[in-house]
Image (cartoon, grey):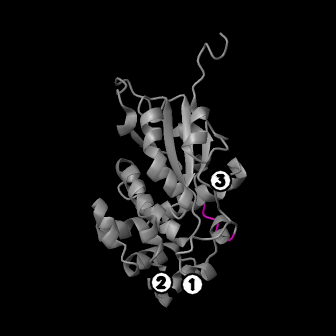
Amino acid sequence: MQMVEGKRNGSLHMKLLNILKIAAIYSAAIPVIAAPASAFEPASAAAVTTDTPAPANWLGQYAETPLGSFTIGNPDAPVKLVEYASYTCSHCVNFEVEEAQILKEEQVAGGKVNFEIRSLVRDPIDLIMASLARCGGKDRFFANHHFLMLNSQSFTSRANLLSEATIARLQAQDWTGFMVAAYSEMEYGNLVQQIALDDASAKACLADKNVVANLFAVTDAAQPKYNIMGTPSFLINEKLSGAHNYQTLKPLLAVPTPESKGL
């Protein structure tokens, strides 16, 4: 498990280490940004039921939650699974690249599990990537998320390209100003064009203060509300599971049957 308070990815430039440590993002050092009361309701509050027939495969069913995070699968599934993830966490990368698709095929596709991904922001690069993942909304999030995880090293290795002016924005906690400038200086446009994201759209996402507020609100609530101490961490029906990969998570996702209950 990658600890939130642990050491940064070694590829991140030392300037960023000295400017904004992981703990500063995760702790009270972040300015308090008001979030709507509904932001802290369970993700199931966002579920919408319809009278249309249930699909044979739920992997095309996406939704956005009041938290500003995203779900895939049956909104009425008996198991609500939440992953707290960071784009600069190597263990999160491993889960997404090696295990997430297996989870979706075995647990989500049939309607048993609804899977939500929440970002736990650890550092400035993570904040940029989490904001970019949300470009295009619910229908593009999971594809964006996979691409960003798969290319995490390419994003985190460019911090040495930042100018002093952009670093000053970060020091001043001008989050959106920093992200927009950093996007250009670190030449992220060359990367995100692979997911058909143009510069204008990407910069508009990075300039969205509501997205930043939601990301910080989710991060700030993770430890006191759920005792989340690192990433990846998984909630099962609003309870911290203790699992950190699919091998340990899978047996915890079993839906009780009348037989297993002794009925």
Q: Which residues are magenta?
A: 29-34
Query: Which of the two labelled residues, at mark 1 and mark 3, occupies the earlier sequence position?
Result: 1
| Residue type, numbered disc 2 | Asn
Inter-mark Cα distance, 3 to 2: 30 Å
Query: Which of the two labelled residues, at mark 2 and mark 1, occupies the earlier sequence position?
Result: 1
Out of 248 and 14, give the one closest to the viewer: 248
Name which residue lies at 58% across and 58% down. 120
- Give yes or no for contact between labels 2 and 1 (Cβ–Cβ under 8 Å): yes
Q: Is residue 194 left or right of residue 93?
A: left
Inter-mark Cα distance, 2 to 1: 8 Å
Q: Secondary structure at mark 2?
A: helix
Residue farthest to the bottom, as pictured = 164
Classify 10 Å Cα crowding around label 1: few (below 14), some (14-19), many (20 and above).
Answer: few
Q: Which residue is mark 1?
A: 15
Inter-mark Cα distance, 1 to 3: 27 Å
Q: Which residue is mark 2?
A: 160
